[in-house]
């Protein structure tokens, strides 16, 4: 009885207070809403409108209907950009997550100097997208760069890792895999959440390390895998800086690193076809949204929530 | 105790994780391309009837410093006019300028470049300078003409450059090869000499850096053969045969080891003057704009020389030409056309301006101003000025302003040339693709 009264009283005050808080909340949220409206929502809607025009940035737009969208499907470089981007996303993201998980498992052992290692492995995530690293990458992977000098020491003749059309995209994928720090830290946090008693029970039942990993760690970690997968996929679709710097903005050599975003940028700012670029941006949004939706639907079949 | 904790945890964990994943997905999607160029401060009039104009330019730190001095000088001489500087590096310049124009905030005075001039002129962004009364009598007529489109003067050349061959006499000497006679040498001589230098100068030193990434070389070859890259009416004026011949030179140079392999050529191309063959003392020849002689000389530490491109006496006529280094243009929508024009006039015609910036915006287009600085030039710039003076009589005419869409040329040229170097396209296929892609870009 007392408890019920207590609950009722708390509820009552809660609703009352909510009412009073409305204005204050609105005031405090106003700057954020203004930002959302001006910096995100307005450009979003504007770009949707512009995607149906021949906007050049320099002159007023004219309505041309869906021409920009139909044009995409006759544009060979558009398909090249899609191919490059999909290859990049579907190869480098799984590899990156595998690397992140592997290192998280090693670091989870609780070795000495763990914090140091964790920071050291996280560092590439902070640096990976930066201009400086992309420039460094270009040097290290050059025909006469560090990698080839090491290879030459072992008598192997290297190639121009970023200047040869057959290898440039692969090198960028390696760069992306290397930035495994962020998912690794999240995996580490996930591993810490798995109760030790499961392992104790399993080992009493005679399960080996591999069996434990497959039977306990992996299933309990699937929500984290899912989280990382969704984020890294979206991030990979939007990769821009590495390709822009490594190829000098061209997507070269021979369009082998022509990421979707890079082509979009070229169309908008080099060819002054902002209408077409806007249409491309919306197409990318649909692709990414579709992929993410599929991801969420599929997650029902493999993501295991421990309840 | 422990059990209760784990039993309670799952529901919150699950909800939290799903929510977090969804929120993260949203946040990431929303963040697409989050960095937009910062808008420059709005212009307007100062409190005391002071007129404020904004001047936009691109360049290095040195240029920013000298330009600021020039602005100070102008303000000193013209009380009542304030010039607001708006500068960035080359790469960021065009994004920023286009964004300013789109935002209705076009700089009153801006520097322009030939590949972009037509895009801005035909869309009504920049004004006809002949109506604003900028003094051009000291600038040669054919140089003024490089800023004309359909009879209107959209930009006035700040200075001139020539696309020329830069050679390193020390590496020629090291290889035991004689410097070529640039008045008579042919394209075949060029290939042969580069091969000889590579053979004589030892490992890791080449005769020439690949020249196929820049369409200016193609334009020179086309002009030598009586063609032109672009016609005055904005269509392509070069034949497939000439384009194929242009790409074939690169292949010949790779075949006789006169230039590095394809991968290295791409890398040297991306490395700028400082990292080029000439800049790193690993090559004897490279094709550059004449105003880059200073940067190249500084990087190499050698006394580099400017030579005419090969083939100047091989075909119908000479192909070399003066290119406007950049232009000064005035916004068509400026509120202060008079003051803007006055500033452009000052930049072009005041010898004190030239004394400050010397050849930083090309060898000055104004002849009397050019004369006035000749004694003050550094060695390399002096050699450049002499070279340009030698060319004066040989140059037949100046090419027309490239048409709309020619800003895409650099990308197309780089891509196709790379494919040729890697053997993915024959020169004939490359020529065909070049003509169709450029044709599409310029809409002809």
Image (cartoon, rainbow, N blue to C red):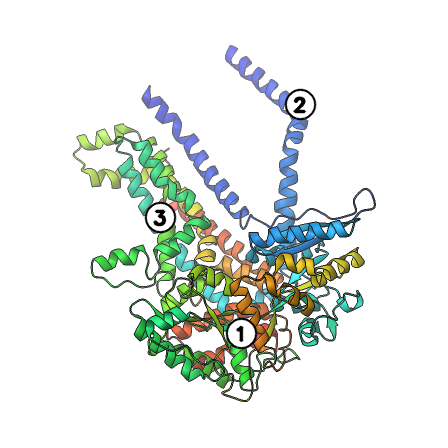
SS class of the residue under badge 1? helix
Residue farthest to the bottom? B316
Q: CA distance from mark 2 to mark 3?
A: 50 Å
For label 2, count other residues whose C-alpha is less than 10 Å away and answer few (under 14), some (14-19) or many (20+).
few
Q: Which mark is residue B216?
A: 1
* Residue drawn at (38%, 53%) of the image: A137
SS class of the residue under badge 2? helix
Q: Is residue B223 above or below residue A75?
A: below
Residue A220 appears in view: yes
Give the number of the mark in front: 2 or 3.
Answer: 3
Residue B407 horizontal/vertical position (percent): 58, 67
Closest to the observer: A109 or B416?
Answer: B416
Give the number of the mark in front: 3 or 1.
Answer: 1
Q: Is residue B427 above or below residue A289?
A: below
* Residue drawn at (31%, 42%) of the image: A101
Q: CA distance from mark 1 to mark 2?
A: 71 Å
Chain bearing tag 3 is A
Q: Are marks 3 and 1 in contact (CB under 8 Å)?
A: no
Residue indicated by mark 2 = A20
Q: Which mark is residue A178?
A: 3
Asked whether, in this view, residue B52 is left or right of residue A129, the answer is: right
* Mark sitting earlier along the chain (2/3): 2
Q: Is residue A185 above or below residue B380?
A: above
Closest to the observer: B359 or A13?
Answer: B359
Chain bearing tag 2 is A
Snapshot quadrant of residue B63: bottom right
Q: CA distance from mark 3 to mark 1?
A: 40 Å
């Amino acid at each position: 009885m007392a408890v019920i009264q207590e609950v009722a009283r708390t509820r009552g005050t809660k609703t009352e207070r909510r009412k009073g808080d409305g204005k204050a909340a609105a005031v405090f949220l106003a700057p954020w809403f203004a930002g959302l409206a001006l910096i995100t929502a307005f450009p979003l809607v504007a770009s949707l409108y512009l995607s149906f025009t021949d906007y050049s940035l320099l002159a007023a737009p004219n309505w041309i209907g869906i021409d920009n969208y139909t044009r995409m499907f006759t544009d060979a470089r558009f398909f090249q950009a899609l191919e490059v981007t999909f290859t990049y996303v579907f190869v480098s993201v799984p590899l990156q997550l595998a690397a992140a998980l592997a290192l998280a498992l090693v670091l989870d052992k609780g070795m000495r100097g763990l914090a140091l290692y964790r920071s050291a492995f996280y560092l590439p995530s902070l640096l990976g997208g930066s201009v400086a690293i992309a420039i460094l990458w270009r040097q290290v992977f050059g025909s006469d760069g560090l990698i080839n000098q090491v290879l030459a020491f072992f008598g192997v003749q290297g190639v121009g890792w970023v200047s040869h059309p057959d290898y440039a995209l692969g090198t960028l994928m390696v760069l992306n895999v290397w930035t495994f720090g962020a998912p690794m830290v999240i995996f580490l946090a996930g591993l810490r959440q798995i109760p030790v008693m499961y392992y104790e029970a399993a080992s009493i039942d005679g399960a080996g390390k591999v069996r434990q990993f497959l039977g306990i760690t992996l299933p309990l970690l699937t929500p984290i895998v899912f989280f990382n997968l969704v984020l890294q996929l979206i991030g990979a679709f939007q990769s821009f800086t590495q390709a822009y710097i490594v190829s000098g903005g061209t997507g070269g050599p021979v369009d082998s690193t022509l990421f979707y975003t890079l082509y979009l940028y070229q169309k908008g700012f080099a060819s002054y076809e902002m209408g077409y670029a806007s249409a491309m941006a919306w197409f990318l949004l649909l692709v990414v949204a579709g992929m993410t939706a599929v991801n969420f639907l599929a997650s029902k079949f493999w993501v295991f929530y421990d309840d | 105790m422990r059990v209760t904790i784990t039993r309670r945890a799952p529901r919150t964990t699950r909800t939290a994780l799903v929510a977090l994943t969804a929120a993260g997905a949203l946040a990431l999607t929303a963040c697409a391309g989050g960095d937009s160029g910062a808008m420059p401060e709005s212009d307007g009039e100062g409190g005391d009837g002071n007129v404020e104009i904004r001047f936009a330019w691109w360049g290095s730190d040195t240029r920013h410093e000298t330009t600021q001095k020039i602005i100070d000088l102008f303000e000193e001489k013209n009380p009542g006019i304030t010039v607001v500087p708006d500068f960035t590096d080359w790469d960021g310049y065009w994004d920023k300028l286009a964004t300013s124009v789109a935002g209705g905030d076009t700089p009153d005075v801006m520097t322009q470049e030939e590949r972009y001039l037509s895009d801005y002129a035909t869309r009504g962004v920049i004004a006809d300078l002949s109506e604003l009364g900028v003094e051009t009598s000291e600038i040669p007529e054919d140089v003024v003409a490089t800023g004309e489109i359909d009879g209107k003067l959209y930009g006035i050349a700040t200075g001139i450059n020539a696309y020329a061959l830069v050679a390193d006499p020390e590496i020629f000497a090291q290889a035991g090869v004689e410097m070529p006679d640039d008045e008579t040498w042919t394209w075949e001589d060029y290939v042969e000499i580069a091969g000889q230098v590579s053979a004589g100068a030892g490992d890791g030193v080449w005769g020439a850096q690949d020249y196929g990434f820049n369409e200016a070389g193609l334009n020179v070859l086309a002009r030598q053969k009586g063609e032109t890259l672009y016609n005055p009416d904005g269509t392509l004026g070069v034949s497939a045969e000439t384009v194929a011949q242009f790409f074939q030179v690169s292949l010949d140079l790779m075949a006789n080891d006169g230039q590095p392999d394809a991968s290295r050529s791409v890398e040297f191309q991306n490395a700028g003057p400082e990292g080029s063959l000439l800049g790193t003392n690993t090559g004897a020849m490279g094709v550059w704009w004449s105003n880059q002689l200073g940067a190249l000389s500084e990087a190499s530490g050698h006394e580099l020389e400017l030579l005419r491109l090969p083939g100047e006496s091989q075909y119908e006529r000479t192909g070399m030409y003066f290119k406007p280094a950049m232009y000064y243009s005035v916004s068509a929508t400026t509120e202060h056309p008079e003051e803007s024009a006055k500033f452009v006039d000052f930049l072009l015609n005041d010898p004190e301006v030239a004394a400050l910036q010397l050849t930083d915006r090309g060898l000055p287009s104004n002849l009397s101003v050019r004369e006035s600085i000749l004694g003050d030039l550094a060695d390399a710039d002096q050699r450049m000025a002499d070279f340009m003076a030698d060319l004066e009589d040989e140059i037949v005419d100046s090419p027309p302003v490239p048409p709309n869409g020619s800003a895409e040329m650099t990308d197309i040229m780089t891509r196709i040339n790379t494919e040729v170097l890697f053997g993915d396209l024959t020169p004939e296929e490359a020529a065909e693709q070049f003509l169709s892609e450029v044709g599409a870009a310029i809409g002809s």
